Amino acid sequence: MKAQKRLIQGANMPSASPSLLEATQEIIRQALEKLGYSEATYELLREPLRVLTVRIPVRMDDGSVRVFTGYRVQHNDATGPTKGGIRFHPDVTEEEVKALALWMSLKAGIFELPYGGGKGGIVCDPRTMSLGELERLSRGYVRAISQIVGPTKDIPAPDVYTNAQVMAWMYDEYSRIREYDSPSFISGKPIVLGGSKGRDKATGLGVVVAAREAAKTRNIDLAGAKVIVQGFGNVGSHVAELLHAQGAKVVGISDANGALYKPEGLDIPYLLDRRDSFGMVTNLFQDEVITNADLLTKPCEILIPAAIENQIREDNADQIQAGIVVEAANGPTTLEATRILDRRGVLIVPDILANAGGVTVSYFEWVQNNQGLYWTEEEVTRRLEEMMVEAVHKVLDTARHHQVDTRLAAYMVGIRRLAEAVQLRGWV
């Protein structure tokens, strides 16, 4: 593989699931019923307002032309412009992007951000493309969606297999089309182009703060707590690094090839130093590798799934030994497994709460771009931590007050603001 092809990095990619959208819609329905909203409100919010499918012709390095399919989904803009990442992956589907846009609306609602949810994706494999091909694809996508996006319409961001360089190309193309500089069009940019300090570790930091606050409710001190992190990609590696720095004992980590588990704790700085650009490190420890499935059921106090969806299921939920599950990945726990864990007294910090640090700092970047005033990394970290702490306790308080599991509570908190907005606007 050419070296330049390895520069495009991203989080581990969940495979497309035909039930992903349906599962999301079912919990939204339950949340709206608990909150007393009408069937019409559910019918409006269960599907995105807009779905744009585009075809992007790209001249490849060998002179041939390939045509790529892309999507941009805008769930609902009643509370403000839509906001959400753009992923490059061969398994991108319209249904998956629609579900992820709904999740972005819920995250914005939990954190009271002035956004609705959006999401984008292109069906491609960036690991097999040169930087020139990726640049032409990125610019072509922006040209294709330019009429429906913008600082007050829809603000993209990085996601799976996209990064600050891809955002820089898209930002430049949008500014050329509009014929004026528009840094607030997109977030996740390089700092020199208006990006926010602290953006690269934002999701991981949010997960760690959520884990710490959840641990407090069980009288567990994060310093010294035994933690398993399933996944060692962009999010999982930052989570493991931050936990280790705060004194937690990270006893297990994994990548796509397998997992490592040591009850006395792993040397996280050493593993971070040895991993490759795609987060792979277990291949260096063949004699010690166990399966990802086995890692999930090992003893620990806090389990952090940070890999792919549907890892905790009906068939293994009873074997989970952790008392707290913090979902850094999207959809790592099925609905049936959620019910089993809740019945067993396991505290779940759901994905739309735990991994929302990225969109929160993307909001900070948008604010800084609009003001032309930029914050220190310490200020970004402080603001993110304050918002995470407030959001975690808001969801836990809702769960206690309504006697529901924390996943439904998070959906109730997330959808309430949007439901109120569409009602006040007279849409339902």
Image (cartoon, rainbow, N blue to C red):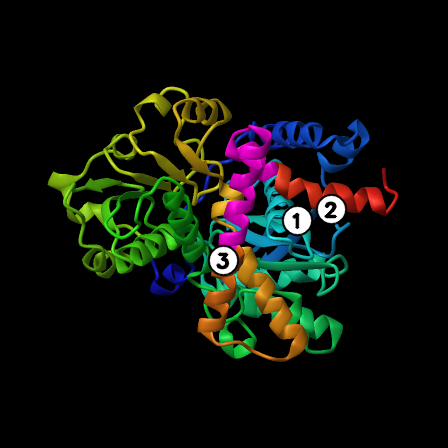
Image-based side of 383 in relation to 241, left or right: right
Mark 2 crowdedness (10 Å alpha carbons): few <14, some 14-19, many ≥20: many
Label 3 residue SS = loop
Sequence-earlier tag: 1 or 3 = 1
Q: Nearer the viewer, mark 1 or mark 3?
A: 1
Q: Is tag 3's residue or tag 2's residue first in the polypeptide sequence?
A: 2
Task: Please name the residue that numbered disc 1 is placed on.
Answer: 117
Which type of secondary structure does the marked residue at label 2 adopt?
A: loop
Q: Amino acid at mark 1?
A: Gly
Q: Which mark is residue 162?
A: 3
Q: Mark 1 to mark 3: distance in Å?
A: 19 Å
Query: For the residues marked 1 and 2, what is the alpha-carbon distance in whole angstroms?
Result: 6 Å
What residue is pinned by disc 2? 76
Q: Are marks 1 and 3 in contact (CB under 8 Å)?
A: no
Picture layout, residue 193 above or below residue 421: below
Q: Earlier in the sequence, mark 1 or mark 2?
A: 2
Task: Judge depth for marks 3 and 2 and give the one in front.
Answer: 2
